[in-house]
Amino acid sequence: MKPFSIFFRLFSIQLFFGQNTILHPSPSSIILSLSGLSLLLVPTISISLVEEAAADSSTSKNNEKNKKKSSIRKLDDTFPFQEVQSLLTKLTNNKNGNEIDPSKASESSKSEEEEEDDKNNNEEAMEASKLVTSYLFENIQSRITNMYQNKAKSPHCRTKIANHFYQYINAIATESPMPFTDGKFHNTCPEPSIDFDNLPKNVSLSSIMLRKYQPPKEDAVYIENANDLILLYGILTHNTHISTIRLIEALQDNYSSDNSNRNGTTLFVVHVDGKESSDHVYDALIEYAMDKDHVHIVPNEYRVRVNWGGYSMVNATMQILKYSFALLQPLSSTSTSTSTVLKEPLQFHKFLHISSSTYPIKSNTEIRNTLASYPIDANMLSVVMKPISPNPASWHYFVECDDAVHRIYRLQPLSKDTNHGIDQYMSSQWFVISHEFAKYLAFAEQGTLVQQYMEYAKHVVVADEGFFGTVLRNSEFCTKHENTNFLHLQFDIWESDLENIQRDQRKCLMPDPDRCGRSPTILSSDYLFGLEISNDLFARKFSDEEESKVKDILDIKRAKAEAKFRDIAAGNFTEGL
């Protein structure tokens, strides 16, 4: 059983959505009690790659599957000892046969004879090492050839892969540490570590998972009037400008239809995937934002080519943050970009990170009221509070290029127990954070945890589902953590549960091809009841191409809720009308 997915295996909410549909009411931590059994539903992560790496290998389903995995991972683990020894013996005998000509012996001094012997020995050792090395690197050559044939096509990408293989091979050759084995990270979180195997009697697992940060108003700074709360939405988009524009127009408030009534309390910064296939989306959004000073588009020069499983997802988010704090500079004076960098930082209280496939399920007033009920320094991010402990044999080092991620070798897991200074966490990439934490991430100053961990995270598969939670939980911002992100997510089938021909191979990145990830389910109108009873503010994943009417229905419900708030404010609302 995969950790953190037990809910989906045990409970099928057929009452609401039918035979084969699983309802995930909230990505927040939920306690379920069934026949005296309390189950903790932790924030749900969309992939199995981290989960299985964190699981003990002894929990495999059966011996037959273990044998299958073993055979899959093996290239050739038997060194051809007799064959190599025979070749080395032949080489040595040939070299030993090259003795000095006796007729010239009297003409040679002893030192010259020794020099000739040394030369022969050196040549023999060199040729022997070349012979052995050719065998040692046979499997490496096979792996690299396979990578070059399948995903790595450009000279730059092939060189990058070679460079990272070299780091591991060179570490063995020079008896040096492998990458990140001796790294020390700067942990500034003042909270003590939790021993999850020996919790104090007055501390429960649920209380840890359901941690809150809503101190009394005299102990923190709150925005008294929710309408004064300045929200900055950072949006990642790639395949359609229509859904992005619809999302912006659903969330923007305090703007009239002619865009004349603006007070700057809702701002948007959009990052468009840097691939050529998204250029039309970028052009359309640039045109849309041209006369809207509350909508910003990350300049073309800073668009990141985003790939499933790659650090590029984190990098795209970082570009939004850097743009928002006016940290991006024009890359050249001759730039033809139709979007410009900021000269002054945007002013905001909360940064909300969402996807263009996200949509609000509550009215804008409800969103504002909910966020205003927390201090302005609160950080809402769903984190599995128990640090992950990856199996070193399953925790891999990746590099990203040519719009793909490439597995190199094993990556050193990090934990306080191994003197790296920090623990690693599974978390959501979608969050609501404070201005201060957003600034900390954007600046990534030298020597800070975010700057140090960034170098490590570049080689972690699906880094976005761990990066922000790990930084939060190991930095001084850990004390201002509310363990939710107000986002409803729905997951169903793992990619590895599909037939091989149906799988999205981008999500099958491990040596075992049956260990794959998954993505959120497309939410249709069948899920509306679940969305209606959810306490979350947003949901994903929606698709205008597959079914847009669910958004139409949500818009109607949101408009009714908004009208109710207006009537209440005007004193015109009567319950039951």
Image: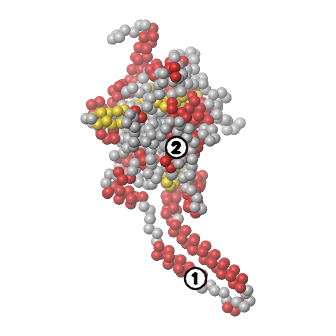
Can residue 297 be spotted in the picture?
no
**Location of residue 543 by image quarter:** top left
Q: Is residue 144 above or below residue 453?
A: below
Q: Is residue 118 above or below residue 432?
A: below
List x then y, in percent, for residue 399.
Answer: 54, 50
List x then y, in percent, for residue 83.
Answer: 47, 75
List x then y, in percent, for residue 148.
Answer: 52, 56
Residue type, numbered disc 2? Ile
The residue positioned farthest toward the left in the image shown: 35
| Element class at badge 2 | loop
Q: Residue at x 64, y 29 (%)?
A: 342
Looking at the picture, tell me which residue is in the foreground, 103 or 51. Answer: 51
Residue type, numbered disc 1? Asn
How packed mark 1 is, by other alpha carbons closer than 10 Å (few <14, some 14-19, many 20 or more), is: few
Residue designated by label 2: 422
In the picture provided, is 116 more to the left or to the right than 373?
right
Q: Count the marks: how many?
A: 2
Residue 286 is tagged as none
Q: Residue at x 42, y 58 (%)?
A: 73
Mark 1 or mark 2, which is nearer to you?
2
| N-term mark: 1 or 2 | 1
Query: Disc 1 and disc 2: Cα gap in Å?
Result: 57 Å
Q: Residue at x 43, y 42 (%)?
A: 195
Looking at the picture, tell me which residue is in the foreground, 500 or 27. Answer: 27
The residue positioned farthest toward the front in the image shown: 201
Q: Residue at x 33, y 37 (%)?
A: 39
Residue designated by label 1: 94
Looking at the picture, tell me which residue is in the foreground, 37 or 263. Answer: 37
Question: Where, quadrant-wise, is the C terminus in this rendering?
Answer: top left
The residue positioned farthest toward the bottom in the image shown: 103
Can residue 535 be spotted in the picture?
yes
